[in-house]
Amino acid sequence: MTKIKRETKETQIELSLEVYGEGKSEIDTKIGFFDHMLESLAKHALFNLKIECKGDIHVDFHHTVEDVGIVLGQAIKKEIYPIKNIERFANSVVVMDEAAVECAIDTSNRAFLVYDLPLENKIGEFDAELVEEFFRALVFNASLTAHIIYQRGKNRHHIAEAAFKAFAVAFRRALYKNERAAVPSTKGVL
C-alpha cells in the first residue's frame, strides 16, 4: 500500500492506494461528480483507494481535480515500477448507454496522453474540461502512456463516466500478472 500526503496553498490531500485491491474506495473531494468518477475508477480497476481532499473549491474545481490526479499518479508510479511479470499493454471499450469510449494503455514508464473526448460546458456543476486535466495529471505523474478516444455518445455524464471506466479496465488488464513476461520490454527494463 502506498500513502501520500500533499499540501499546497490550494489543496491538502491524503491518499492511500493498493493497486491490487478489491475495488473498495472512500473518496471525499467535496466535488460530488468527481467523487463518483473516482469511485468508478477504483471499482473497475480493482484498486483500494482512499482520498481525502480539502481544496479551494470556492475558487473553482480545477486545483482539486488536477492535484488529485497528480497525487494518484504519484501513488500509481510507486506501486507499479519497476515493471515485472505483467502484461504491460491493454485496452478497453466501455459503453454507457449511447456512449462508448476506448482507452489503450502502456505501462511504459514514459508519459504521454492522447485525449479525444468532445466534453465541453458543464456536467452538473462540474467543468467538463477538467476530465482532461485529471487524466493529464494522472498519466504524467504515473509515467503511463494512455489514449482515451471517444467513439460515440451525446450525454456528457455518460461520456465522462465511460472514459473513467475504460481507463480503469484497461489499466487493470495491463497490470494482469504474467510470470512468462518477465520484464515486458526488449530494453530489459521499464
Image (spheres, rainbow, N blue to C red):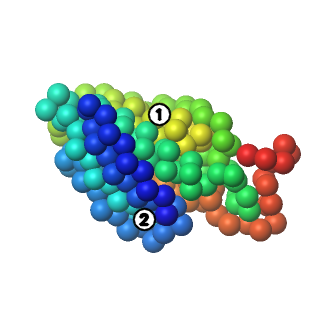
Tell which circle, 2 or 1, labels the residue nearer the N-terminal end. Answer: 2
Classify residue 113 by image quadrant: top right
Left or right, residue 61 beside residue 96: left
Q: Is residue 129 visible?
A: yes
Q: Position of residue 22 (x, y in %)?
A: 45, 71
Q: Position of residue 140 (x, y in %)?
A: 53, 35
User: Please, what is the three-letter code of the amino acid marked with disc 1?
Assistant: Arg
Seen in the picture, residue 49 relative to 163 is either above or below; the reply is below
Seen in the picture, residue 57 relative to 107 is either above or below; the reply is above
Q: Position of residue 185 (x, y in %)?
A: 80, 48
Q: Position of residue 182 (x, y in %)?
A: 80, 60
Left or right, residue 139 beside residue 165: right
User: Mark 2 falls on what kind of element?
Assistant: strand
The residue lying toward the viewer, choosing from 161 and 187, is 187
Q: Identify the residue at horizontal 18%, vertical 40% (top origin).
A: 124
The residue lying toward the viewer, choosing from 99 and 48, is 48
Q: Which residue is mark 2?
A: 48
Q: Identify the residue at horizontal 27%, vertical 47% (top origin).
A: 53
Q: Identify the residue at horizontal 20%, vertical 30% (top origin).
A: 60
Q: Which residue is mark 1?
A: 136
Q: Identify the residue at horizontal 41%, vertical 33% (top origin).
A: 132
User: Please, what is the three-letter code of the amino acid marked with disc 2?
Assistant: Asn
Q: Is residue 42 visible?
A: no
Dot 1 surroundings within 10 Å: few (below 14), some, or many (20 or more)? Answer: many
Classify residue 112 by image quadrant: top right
User: Mark 1 falls on what kind of element?
Assistant: helix
- Closer mark to the observer between disc 2 and disc 1: 2
Classify residue 11 by image quadrant: top left
Left or right, residue 63 beside residue 4: left
Dot 2 surroundings within 10 Å: few (below 14), some, or many (20 or more)? Answer: many
Given the current orientation, which residue lies at the most extreme left position? 58
